[in-house]
């Protein structure tokens, strides 16, 4: 008798993720439809993962990004995503498009390439969200938060407000840059996150966008949508959804948001 072996006969998707994170793969596998698979390349480079040239004619990929792309090129993938929200934030206007071009030069014309930023914009438009409430992880420092707000504004997104998740008293004295290395990435709890989003979401919001691929949250999408009466998007959810679309897979995935109905 045949058993499920997670072989990507419908779609194989490559994903660049932070080297020390476990959340992206875990959340993708939780949502992944049968016949599709995800394959990770881990990146140790600092943010952003591709740096602008002096004349801004393009970007130069970090060494492990280029190495990962070379490996992906031989894996018969249907799509590749750069799964790092903050790279787009710090890279700024035009960075996503420039990075897609640089990756495509290595991956070739037959593999669709996207970024978490592009996936978010596409999902917001598809879901009809015009005034999203933005939720950010606690390990983003003040400069990254400001760059993130500017990133959405510069891309024509009008936010109804934003929330930076409070991980609780045991973490409030830890500087943002030290939270993940100190273990917060593996100590995340989704119930307090659910309560904070539900309490803070403004009336004028018509959707929620949770940024950060290392931010554990897909387990509360369904509950938040029921309670708030509006669509909820998350970083890993939107990238999986868009990569499936780019791969020609239209899968109904219950329990992880109304986005998958589009």
Image (tube, helix red, strand yellow):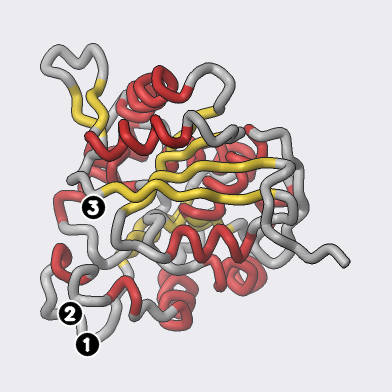
Residue 169, disc: 1
Indicate the position of residue 105 as horizontal and vertical percent values: 40, 17
Whether residue 158 is visible here, answered yes or no, is no
Quickly name the residue at label 3: 145
Quarter-of-image position of residue 55: top left
Q: CA distance from mark 1 to mark 2?
A: 5 Å
Residue position marked by numbered label 2 in the rendering: 172
Q: For this rendering, which residue is in front, 262 or 83?
A: 83
From the viewer's perspective, is 119 left or right of 18?
A: right
Look at the numbered disc 1 and give the secondary structure of its residue.
loop
The count of marks equals: 3
Distance from Cα at disc 3 to Cα at disc 2: 17 Å
Q: Residues within 10 Å of mark 2 (few under 14, many from 20)?
A: few
54 left or right of 212 in image: left
Q: Determine the CA span between mark 1 and mark 3.
A: 21 Å
> At x 39% / y 26%, what residue is drawn?
103
Please say if 35 is above or below 126.
below
Circle 3 SS class: helix
């Amino acid at each position: 008798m045949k058993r499920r072996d997670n072989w990507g006969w419908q779609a194989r998707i490559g994903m660049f993720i932070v080297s020390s994170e476990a959340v992206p793969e875990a959340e993708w596998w939780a949502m992944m439809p049968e016949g599709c698979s995800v394959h990770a390349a881990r990146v140790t480079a600092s943010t952003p993962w591709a740096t602008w040239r002096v004349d801004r004619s393009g970007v130069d990929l970090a060494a492990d990004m280029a190495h990962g792309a070379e490996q992906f090129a031989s894996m018969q993938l249907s799509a590749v995503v750069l799964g790092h929200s903050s790279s787009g934030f710090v890279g700024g206007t035009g960075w996503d498009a420039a990075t897609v071009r640089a990756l495509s030069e290595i991956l070739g014309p037959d593999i669709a390439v996207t970024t978490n930023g592009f996936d978010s914009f596409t999902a917001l438009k598809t879901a009809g969200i015009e005034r999203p409430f933005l939720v950010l992880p606690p390990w983003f420092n003040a400069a990254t938060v400001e760059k993130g707000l500017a990133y959405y504004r510069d891309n024509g997104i009008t936010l109804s407000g934003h929330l930076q998740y409070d991980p609780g008293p045991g973490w409030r004295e830890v500087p943002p840059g030290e939270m993940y290395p100190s273990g917060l990435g593996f100590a995340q709890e989704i119930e307090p996150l659910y309560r904070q989003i539900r309490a803070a979401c403004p009336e004028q919001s018509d959707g929620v966008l949770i940024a950060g691929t290392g931010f554990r949250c897909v387990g509360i999408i369904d509950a938040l949508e029921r309670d708030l009466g509006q669509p909820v998007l998350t970083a890993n959810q939107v990238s999986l959804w868009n990569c499936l679309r780019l791969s020609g897979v239209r899968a109904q995935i219950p329990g992880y948001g109304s986005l998958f109905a589009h």
